[in-house]
Amino acid sequence: MVQFNFTERTIKAKVVYYGPAQSGKTTNLEQIHRLTDPAANNRLISLNTAQDRTLFFDLLPFSLGAVSGYDFKIQLYTVPGQVQYNATRRVVLAGADAVVFVADARRSLAKENQAAFENMKVNLLANRLVPEKVPLVFQYNKQDLPEVMSVAELSKTINPWGRPALGAVAAQGQGVIECFVAVVQDMLAAIAVKYNLKEKGLDPASVPSVVQEAFAEVLKNAAAAAPAAQSSPAPRAAKVVVSQQTDSLHAAPPQTGSENGLVSEELLHRSLRSNVELAESLSGLVREMNLGLGAILSQAELLMVHREDARDKRQAAILAIQQEATRLKKVVAELGDPSAASARGTGDPVGSSRPVASTPTMTSSPSIPSPARAAAPPPVPRAAAPPVPPPSATNGSLHELLQDVLGGAQDALDAQDLSVDLRVPMTTRLPSCPPLALRQALVGTVEGLVTVALRGTQLSLRCERKPVLLKGRDGEVKRDFLMLALAHTGNLSPEDQQRVVQGTDPGPLGQATRLFREMGGFVRFAPLPGGALETRVFLPVA
């Protein structure tokens, strides 16, 4: 069942890959993991039998990123195809928001496909899900093998409702991402309609274009990787496998009876919950380790750059390394400790102990602590290193520019006890604006928001590419903009917002708006649930 958090603007949904045994369900997840997460920041969790066939499920936490202002997260599951594991399939299918039915296109497997499809309908009904209404996409896999059925033949036998159907060769990565994009589009559109998300900024009509845009780079990489996959086998996805060897000669005989069936069902639920917690814990641990090690490496680079006479800066870098190492040690120590999670007031098994106040907290790398708060550890001898030029706004990414801007606003953020959540991807390119003017405008925007934000709250920065319909002399013209959205809580009345938008406000926000206009951009405001506000800066892109 889809889960909403309107305060954090997140949507979590569940997609289940269903189908007969060995049809390619797990292969789909492995290929999605390989193409969407080449750095293996997440792990594919698998619980297998001794024969390396999925017994329970493969779970892959996957984030689609910001979709119309919402951080849309997906958990992908597969079910065991073997006939004897029907109870497991029913439990895994519970709460599914969409289903991908993976069929084996070989003619000899037609009966197995039909049996699995009928089994899926029964298990959907058992979970109070209407098969005709659940977002469903068919994948006709193994198209590279001989004696395969045509798409029309397969659809006639297992696709009575005329749902989207795509051919695929999952082992080579062909059709995998396209099928996943199709099911995400259907699922997200259904969620937007069912929960009336249009009023909250997610228009069902815009879902296909939004999802296609979000997956554009992934689809491009998948197309480029397909020829290489044909000549060489795809690398195994980074995953955690839990296997259990069973000696069939000495295995206890299965117990029967209605009471035992109920107990088994409950045990399955508990097992799945435990494995979900394991996957989330592992994902959180990997995330925290990546963030922490990135922070330590960046501080180590600063130590190499700062001269001997810059003692305060060197001491601040050393202190930051010590603090980050201590934090990571604590994260590992608290892994799996429920009391630690409850003490943090969160259900995250690996809740971050990264400070959320006094310094801007950025999801990619934390900011440098202010030298004024640093202790005074002994200086460390500096190895010889070539001089590195200071950060420049004339090149690099938008993420780097924002880090530079936020670093300059450190004192103002500290004075208001504000933290910063920077969700701009590190690979986001700068918009087609004069770099120095862009930096000046962003500085003014941050300064203006700091003055109106409530003390002790958080600023959140994200970005997305957004098409805008502009009206001109020649009619309506559609142009692409890079929307930088800054969410904050504070006092900015509708009258103040209007003055800022018109560029008549004398404060930093008004001055920044005038600069954005000169660069071909504009500023708008959008209310958020809970009384917060999102300042949206639209910047032209080439």
Image (cartoon, rainbow, N blue to C red):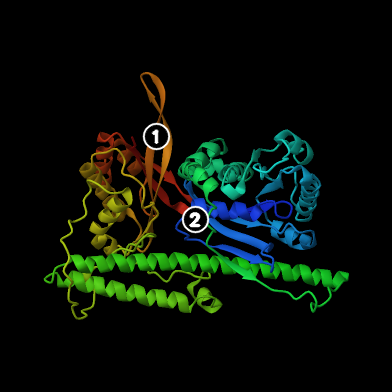
Q: Residue at x 68, y 48 (%)?
A: 102
**What whole-number distance in Å separates the C-alpha atoms at marks 1 and 2?**
28 Å
- Residue 188 appears left or right of 118: left
Q: Residue furthest top?
A: 474
Image quarter where the N terminus lies is bottom right
Residue denoted by label 2: 7
Q: Residues within 10 Å of mark 1 (few under 14, many from 20)?
A: some
Kind of residue at disc 1: Asp
Image quarter where the C terminus lies is top left
Q: Residue furthest right?
A: 257
Q: Residue furthest left?
A: 309
Q: Residue at x 23, y 78 (%)?
A: 375
The x and y percentages for residue 434 are 23, 39
The x and y percentages for residue 261 are 83, 69
SS class of the residue under badge 1? Answer: strand
Q: Residue at x 50, y 61 (%)?
A: 42
The numbered disc on residue 344 is none
The x and y percentages for residue 340 are 50, 77
The numbered disc on residue 480 is 1
The x and y percentages for residue 100 are 66, 47
| Rendered view: 534 above or below 341 | above
1 vs 2, front mark: 1
Kind of residue at disc 2: Thr
| Rendered view: 221 above or below 357 | above
Any part of residue 439 in sight: yes
**Mark 1 or 2 closer to N-term?**
2
